């Protein structure tokens, strides 16, 4: 596809998602109380969108990932929360 | 267009879903053994589940002209209890000669714990001993990168395992390359919020090519879409992919991998 075709097909959807993301940040910032590691990871992931470097989706996923290599001692929960606790 | 759904948990879906999949062109559905949403209390729960996968569910699918196949294992979410896992693994060979069984799966890791890893090694050994195909679940979200690396280490270190007989499922942009580089097959799961969207799956195809790769819905008891594969075929069509290229990803690729099992037959 040409760049024009990609824009025709996906621009409105991407614009919608970007506004949702901005509204999420506004929502969490005006809420009371403390935030946690998830917001820190989110802000770190946002920096991967800057510039014209390729592989933005991959780099966002890496920003949320556990970078360690050894198995943990025991699984105490079943779910994942979406961001690694440093 | 005809397609194969290579990963769906139909025991959790309604009969209406079978009807919709048949109308959409589904020729065959493959159901890996998975977590029921709660931990089973004893090995007998798995015996009943394996009977459901090998006896009841094929009959349910056949009513809509869909062939049903399955994979057997203890899933990684219940693998922290190694004693239970050993009992389930001892049970599995009794079911391997059932006509719709394709192999061992979906084995893998969930939280990347030592016990999960031990049980993964035991099930890789089981697959090697019985010459079975392997279907691997990779962990969710922040655990996926590390888990995929650990899983690949286990599989590569067992010299009996032929990489072309292994499918590593739930790959995303940060894990697909390492799986393909290892000579294994990669599965993209089309699942809301936590895995790939249709658009991202097509991006991955356009970036990494369509060799040794398939896509699946992994529809289950969570919010998920049993028609995710044909919807992604439509996404490919919207981008101008030719019909032959779409057929390769949604039908021929899964067919070629799955036909390595003598039990897999489709039209």
Image (cartoon, helix red, strand yellow):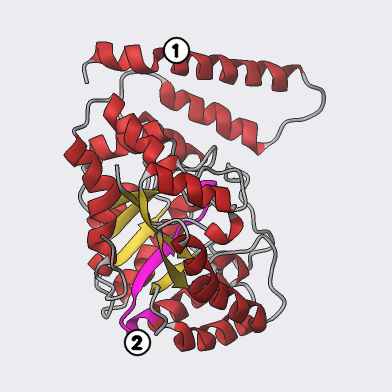
Q: Is residue B186 left or right of residue A40?
A: left
Q: Say above or below: A82 vs B83.
A: above
Residue B24 in the image: state x and y as whole percent: 40, 42
Residue at 39 percent across and 65 percent down: it is: B135
Question: Please, which residue is most extreme toward the right here?
Answer: A32
Which quadrant is home to the N terminus of chain B?
A: top left
Q: Quadrant of residue A54?
A: top left
Which quadrant is home to the C terminus of chain B?
A: bottom left
Q: Say above or below: B108 vs B209.
A: below
Magenta stretch: includes residue B133: yes
Residue B88 in the image: state x and y as whole percent: 56, 82
Q: Which residues are magenta?
A: B127-141
Q: Which mark is residue B129?
A: 2
C-alpha span from label 2 to label 1: 53 Å
Label 2 secondary element: helix
Residue at 23 percent across and 66 percent down: it is: B164
Q: Is residue B84 left or right of residue B216?
A: right
- The crowding category of the residue bearing disc 1, from other C-alpha atoms within 10 Å (few below 14, some 14 to 19, many at least 20), is few
Label 2: chain letter = B
């Amino acid at each position: 596809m040409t760049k024009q075709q990609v824009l025709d097909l996906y621009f409105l959807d991407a614009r919608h998602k970007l506004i949702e993301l901005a509204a999420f940040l506004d929502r969490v910032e005006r809420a009371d109380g403390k935030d946690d590691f998830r917001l820190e990871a989110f802000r770190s992931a946002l920096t991967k969108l800057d510039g014209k470097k390729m592989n933005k989706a991959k780099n966002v996923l890496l920003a949320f990932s556990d970078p360690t290599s050894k198995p943990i001692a025991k699984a105490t929960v079943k779910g994942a929360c979406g961001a690694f606790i440093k | 267009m005809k397609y194969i759904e290579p990963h769906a948990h139909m025991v959790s879906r309604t009969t209406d879903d079978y009807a919709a999949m048949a109308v959409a062109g589904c020729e065959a559905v493959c159901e890996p053994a998975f977590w029921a949403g709660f931990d089973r209390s004893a090995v007998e729960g798995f015996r009943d589940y394996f009977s459901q996968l090998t006896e009841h569910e094929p009959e349910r699918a056949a009513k809509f002209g869909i062939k049903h196949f399955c994979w057997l294992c203890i899933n990684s979410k219940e693998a922290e209890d190694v004693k239970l896992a050993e009992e389930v693994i001892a049970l599995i060979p009794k079911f391997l000669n059932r006509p719709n069984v394709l192999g061992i799966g979906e084995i893998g890791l969930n939280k990347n714990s030592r016990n999960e890893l031990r049980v993964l090694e035991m099930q890789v050994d089981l697959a090697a001993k019985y010459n079975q195909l392997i279907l691997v679940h990779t962990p969710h979200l922040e655990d996926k990168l590390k888990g995929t690396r650990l899983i690949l280490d286990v599989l590569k270190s067992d010299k009996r395992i032929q990489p072309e007989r292994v499918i590593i499922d739930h790959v995303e942009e940060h894990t697909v390359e390492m799986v393909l580089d290892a000579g294994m097959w990669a599965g993209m799961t089309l699942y809301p919020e936590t895995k790939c969207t249709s658009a991202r799956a097509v991006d991955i195809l356009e970036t990494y090519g369509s060799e040794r790769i398939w896509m699946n819905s992994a529809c289950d008891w969570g919010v998920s879409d049993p028609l995710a594969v044909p919807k992604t075929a439509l996404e490919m069509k919207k981008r101008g992919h030719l019909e032959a290229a779409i057929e390769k990803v949604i039908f021929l690729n899964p067919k070629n991998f799955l036909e390595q099992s003598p039990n897999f037959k489709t039209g």
